[in-house]
Image (cartoon, rainbow, N blue to C red):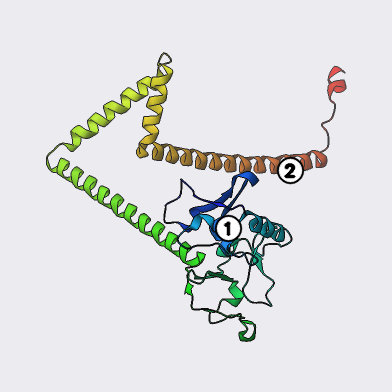
Amino acid sequence: MAKMLRRQCAFCPEDEECSIMYIAEGQNLAVHQDCLLYSSGFVESEEHNPENLDIRFDVASVVNELKRGRRLICNFCRKRGATVGCEVKTCRRSYHYFCALCDDAAIETDEVHGIYRVFCPNHDPDRKNNLYDEDSKRERSPITVQSSSAKKKMIVKEKIAEDSLEALRKKQERQKVRVEFLRKCKRAGLLDEIFEEMLDTLHLAQEKLMDDSTPDAVYEETVISLFDCGLFENILASAHSASYTGTEEKIQELLETRKRLDTQIELLKDLKVILPPPEDTSSCTSE
């Protein structure tokens, strides 16, 4: 009987179980080892030898399990192919293996006896508040409880937090060094010279930006250098804020002026109605 060939992903660490795959070249078929081991309707080949993992699965059994999975919907991603079922007989939940990890399902393993089981979150036997029915338990051998995806996620979060704290410490150390450096420059009487040099550099940058004959490469380099300096960007932001505030005040002032003029126009219209038109005195003058 044709067997699946054991392979390992070249990009994954060697100690990662998820990196182990089995392929059937003639069938153009490749599957993860864990997806096979935890599939509810799948059993290892009778020829399985723990010392020879290359003949662990036969192609026909894998194909049959794939056909069975096409009828099952994953409780997590809602897609077909969910061959991993909850170990509780009355539970109807099925998963893809990695979807079970994402849903915090409990993974239980007894490699010696070839037992690989999955319990959905509602039936995790190690949780205090679970719906695991003692009468519906299957016969169980001594097993080792693997860490679920929740534990893996916690490890990743702790690693990220640790890296963030380390980066913050390094940033604080750099800031302390810079502050102490400027204090020493001040005590040595060099601070004025440093600011004069900064002003000369800014004047030179201004000349390059104002000169239309400046090459594009030099222009772009100067602009990038200015924006890389936090002081320049802060000044631009302050100027923009002041300009925005001044514009808003001017608009408000004009609106108030317009309101006063509208009021005066209405009053003048009322006076025009009340006042009689001027008398025509031209005829009297001619007589």
Per the model, the C-alpha gap separating discs 1 and 2 is: 98 Å
> Residue 90 lies in what quarter of the image?
bottom right
The residue that appears at 81% across and 42% down in the rendered structure is 274
Q: Is residue 35 left or right of residue 175?
A: right
Image coordinates for residue 117, horizontal then vertical, percent: 56, 70
The amino acid pointed to by label 1 is: Phe
Q: Which residue is mark 1?
A: 57
> Residue 231 lies in what quarter of the image?
top left
Q: Residue furthest left?
A: 188
Q: Which mark is residue 99?
A: none
Image coordinates for residue 80, horizontal then vertical, percent: 70, 58
Q: Which mark is residue 267?
A: 2
Mark 2 burial class by Cα count in 10 Å: few <14, some 14-19, many 20+:
few
The residue that appears at 40% across and 34% down in the rendered structure is 227
Secondary structure under the numbered disc 2 in the rendered image:
helix
Classify 72 as above or below 28.
Answer: below
Q: Is residue 250 left or right of residue 225?
A: right
Classify 178 as above or below 131.
Answer: above
Mark 1 burial class by Cα count in 10 Å: few <14, some 14-19, many 20+:
many
Looking at this view, is 34 or 231 the one in front? 34
**Mark in front: 1 vs 2:** 1
The residue that appears at 53% across and 56% down in the rendered structure is 55
Quarter of the rendering occupied by the C terminus: top right
The amino acid pointed to by label 2 is: Leu
